[in-house]
Image (cartoon, grey):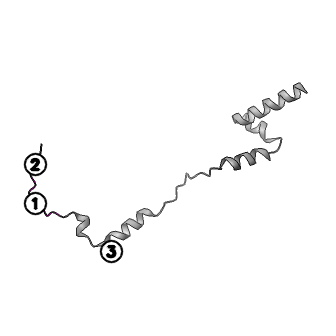
Amino acid sequence: MVSPISHATQSSQSEAQPVAARQPAAQAKSQPTADPADTVKLSSAQLIQQEAVETPVQPPHEASAGDSQARNLLAREAAAKAKG
């Protein structure tokens, strides 16, 4: 249903406030808050470099923790040894 406009010159609350009074609220919202659950994510290049320099002890440890890349590496190394 369409209702007729009774007052054409209504002003909203944001227009009634001075511009200086609105700015601090906008600035407070733009500041990021620290989230305790922030995590660090490595780029793919950093991950590749990290995998390339890991010690021989790390892949079995990571594979036992469920790392599929480490399990694949161990499988390739075992296949290479068996082929020998």
Instruction: Find the magenta span and give its range.
Output: 4-10
Question: From what the image shows, is residue 40 above or below residue 27?
Answer: above
Discs 3, 1 touching: Cβ within 8 Å: no
Check disc 1 and give the amino acid type. Answer: His
- Disc 2 designates what residue? 3
Discs 3, 2 touching: Cβ within 8 Å: no
Work out how far the residue at label 2 is from the one at label 1, CA to CA, in angstroms. 12 Å
Q: Mark 3 or mark 2: which is in front?
A: 2
Secondary structure type for disc 2: loop
Give yes or no for residue 65 being in the magenta stretch: no
Rendering coords of residue 70 (x, y %): 74, 36
- Disc 3 designates what residue? 20
Secondary structure type for disc 3: helix
Rendering coords of residue 56 (x, y %): 83, 41
Q: Nearer the viewer, residue 9 or 30?
A: 9
The quarter holding residue 12 reads bottom left
Residue located farthest toward the top when viewing the structure as drawn? 83
